[in-house]
Image (cartoon, rainbow, N blue to C red):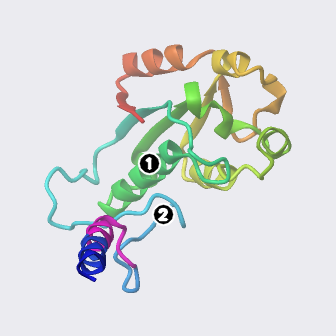
């Protein structure tokens, strides 16, 4: 009996620890997606330090290199691009002042496949395409590394039309950095 009580106590402590680190329930709008609806959850801190200034223009190139654990889930790097848009707009920066380019390569390459070829490769619809469309509407350029497409044995025609096919991720990042873009590796 003592072993059962010890086991149950240990299990409850472990459960409490996991619950404390889980994402909070959102009944009162704690997490919001003010601009890119349904993606890039933010909790805005009006008095947070290092807030973007509404009058400035922000130029960022996102190097998206991480894949997703499950093909039916949005790529986490792409979701972080949405989070960045949501944070800047929530801080008062107009979309027109955001010059964002997100280039996918490495393990992130499949996120740019059109739906037919993504389904063929992974057996599910491409969950990234609705987010890519929303980001494009917000003025974000989503680019795909042409070298990574070839390395993955994909055809260039398989890339979704909302995605810009770039010579490479390497040249995209370095060219944009030379133009004053800040690099954000994801």
Q: Say which residue label 2 marks.
A: 35
| Residue 114 place in picture, x, y as percent | 78, 41
Q: For residue 151, which quarter of the picture?
A: top right
Q: Residue at x 40, y 55 (%)?
A: 94
| Residue 112 place in picture, x, y as percent | 68, 37
Q: Cβ–Cβ below 8 Å for labels 2 and 1?
A: no
**Mark 1 nearby-residue class (10 Å; few <14, some 14–19, many ≥20):** some
Q: Is residue 21 magenta?
A: yes
Q: Is residue 156 left or right of residue 31?
A: right
Q: How many marks?
A: 2
Start-end of magenta stretch: 14-25
- What distance separates the C-alpha of mark 2 from that of mark 1? 13 Å
Q: For residue 22, which quarter of the picture?
A: bottom left
| Residue 123 place in picture, x, y as percent | 81, 48
Q: Residue furthest front?
A: 1
Q: Say which residue label 1 marks.
A: 80
Examine the rendered structure and indicate whether residue 141 appears above or below residue 2. above
| Residue 158 place in picture, x, y as percent | 81, 32
Examine the rendered structure and indicate whether residue 142 appears above or below residue 30. above
């Amino acid at each position: 009996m003592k072993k059962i009580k010890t086991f149950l106590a240990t299990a409850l402590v472990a459960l409490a620890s996991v619950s404390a680190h889980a994402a909070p329930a959102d009944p009162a709008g704690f997490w919001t997606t003010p601009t890119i609806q349904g993606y890039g959850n933010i909790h805005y801190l009006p008095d947070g330090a290092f807030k973007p200034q509404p009058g400035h223009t922000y130029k960022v190139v996102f190097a998206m290199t991480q894949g997703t654990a499950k093909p039916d889930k949005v790529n986490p790097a792409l979701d972080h691009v949405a989070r960045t848009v949501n944070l800047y707009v929530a801080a008062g920066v107009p979309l027109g002042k955001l010059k964002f380019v997100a280039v996918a390569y490495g393990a992130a390459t499949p996120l740019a496949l059109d739906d037919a070829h993504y389904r063929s490769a992974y057996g599910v619809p491409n969950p990234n395409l609705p987010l890519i469309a929303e980001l494009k509407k917000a003025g974000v350029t989503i680019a795909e590394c042409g070298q990574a497409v070839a390395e993955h044995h994909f055809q260039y025609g398989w890339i979704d039309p909302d995605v810009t096919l770039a010579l490479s991720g390497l040249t995209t990042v370095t060219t944009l950095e030379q133009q004053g873009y800040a690099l954000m590796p994801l």
